Image (cartoon, rainbow, N blue to C red):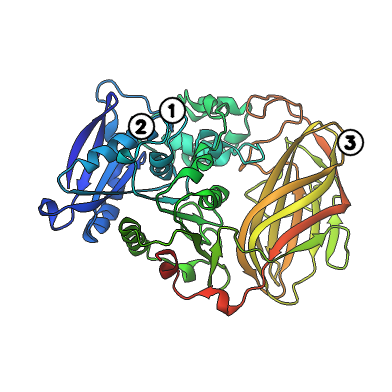
Amino acid sequence: MRTVHLPVHGSRLATDVHLPPAGRARRHPAVVIRTPYGRGSHTAEACAWAARGFAVVVQDVRGRHGSARRGAPEEWRPYAHEAADGAATVRWVRERPWSDGRVVAVGASYAAYCALVAVTGDRAAPAPPPAEAPDAVIAAVPALGTAEVARERSGVERLLGRAGWWAAHGDRSDSDPTALDARLARAPELLAHLPVATLPDRLGRPLPSWRGVWHAPREDLVIARAGVARVPLLAVGGTHDPFAVDTLALWRRWGGPARLLVGPWGHALTADPGPGAQHHIAVGQTYARWARAACDGTLEHTARGVVALAGTPRWHRVDSAVPAGEARAYRFDDDRCVRLLHGAEFVADPDRPVRSDDLRIDPDRADRTLLLTEPLARPLDLLGPASATLRAEATTACADWFVRLVALDADGRAEPVAVGSARTARPVRDDAALRVDLGFLARRLPIGTRLRIEVTGHHFPAHARNPHTGEDPVTAVRLAPSRRTVHTGGSALLLPAARLHRTDAVADPIEEICT
């Protein structure tokens, strides 16, 4: 391994080059990883790629770690320079004597964004010409932009995840992954202080970019431009990842050969929460084999992939439509299968919000509509998008609505299944139907499972509290309660009840995505 400092657009990017055992004596396809998290954290991954015959380039993005100027630190502006810097890096790689000209851009989370915009371009740079674009992309749990990761598609602000990321990485050249947890240990009510915009003051260090997070325009340019891409894509995600919807949208819209690999994983692509060991994948072997097929041009020009069905050892094939069984409707007014326990009327009080980190129910608090299904008489396989339809009213013009779905086993143990949000700004007492998307589900619910359906006005601290005053939740300092009414007639939970057979199962998911 050797380190070079690549001059790019007024900066010098610290770049580690790992060559296969044959070294410079031969030309190799190259893997490019551009990361804000420290190129040293990818050493083992780079060595594994090199052992499989790839030259590997791992680079700190502009303003981070080794790519930050000494003496006069260069400000890191997340998402600002990645398309142009990525194109320059790909061009440089192709000019090296050890390169055979083929380049695979690889990344997870923010680094997946870096890999993708090397093909699609971003707000500051158009799509690069072929000489400066990679020949294939592996994008895992992609975090696609400042505004895209700060808010749900409903517009609701993600608080805990964004506070943790910016505390750890924002406006600094290095990282401290424990920053938020350490501060919360000393000040447990840190995230409850208002306004949200002044969080950096309470963290104890400046974050000049924090306010801009909430004002950045949401354009989804990577997804919008995905249709013109012609290079192969491998999109990797988890059903418990907050950005799963973007992974699926990217795969569906990609213009070149596209493969999808989704398991019962969180953002770190580990089992979080729930069982996942039975769906373990040898990631290095999978990525390398797919990259070889992509570089050799042997992938069929289709959009397909595999999804793990949690609760079983099975993987199932999917195409760009995503298989969907019949939508099973749990109507709130059908007491043969759903019981309203309480809360057809409740108060959403931002001073006492429903907690996202606590599945317990306090029977003395009227802060949600609570429903419970009858126990399942047979296993239920869920594969596809879930949603809820609400006929509901609020006494405040601006209101957030959360639907949380929880599985209860025969002993009453609770496990989260899905959560979705919607935001309304309609006139008071308007009870038109409201749709709440609950994301993509892929799991088996065993016999005896009951589903608990909760309709709430807050989901804190995962999401910022709606103040119910009509003010921006990021800058608001006043809070007001909002009385809610959920009409059981016209309200329903819609689940993708798939009719799966063993013939649908995939014996080897790696074979499926690498052909």
Q: Residue 333 falls in which quadrant of the image? A: bottom right
State which mark lies toward you, 3 or 1.
1
Number of the label disc, if any, that sits on residue 84: 2
SS label for mark 2: helix
Q: Whole-Å distance between the Cαs marked 2 and 3? A: 50 Å
- The quadrant of the image that shows the C terminus is bottom left
Q: Mark 3 belongs to which amino acid?
A: Arg
Q: Given contact means CB atoms under 8 Å apart, are the residues at marks 3 and 1 in contact?
A: no
Q: Is residue 107 left or right of residue 450?
A: left
State the image coordinates of residue 453 (x, y, percent, origin top left). Answer: 75, 56
Of callouts 2 and 3, the N-terminal one: 2
Q: Disc 1 marks which residue?
A: 124
State the image coordinates of residue 363 (x, y, percent, origin top left). Answer: 80, 53
Q: Disc 3 marks which residue?
A: 429
Q: Is residue 54 left or right of residue 252?
A: left
Residue extending farthest to the top is 72
Of callouts 2 and 1, the N-terminal one: 2
Q: Mark 1 belongs to which amino acid?
A: Ala
Q: Residues within 10 Å of mark 3 (few under 14, many from 20)?
A: some
Q: Whole-Å distance between the Cαs marked 2 and 1? A: 8 Å
Q: Tell me the residue at 14%/45% (across/down).
A: 97
Q: Is residue 28 left or right of residue 356?
A: left
Q: Tell me the residue at 70%/52% (across/down).
A: 404
Q: Visible in this render: residue 177?
A: no
- As drawn, 470 above or below 189: above
Q: Mark 2 belongs to which amino acid?
A: Ala
SS label for mark 1: loop
Q: Given contact means CB atoms under 8 Å apart, are the residues at marks 2 and 1 in contact?
A: yes
State the image coordinates of residue 106 (x, y, percent, origin top left). Answer: 36, 49
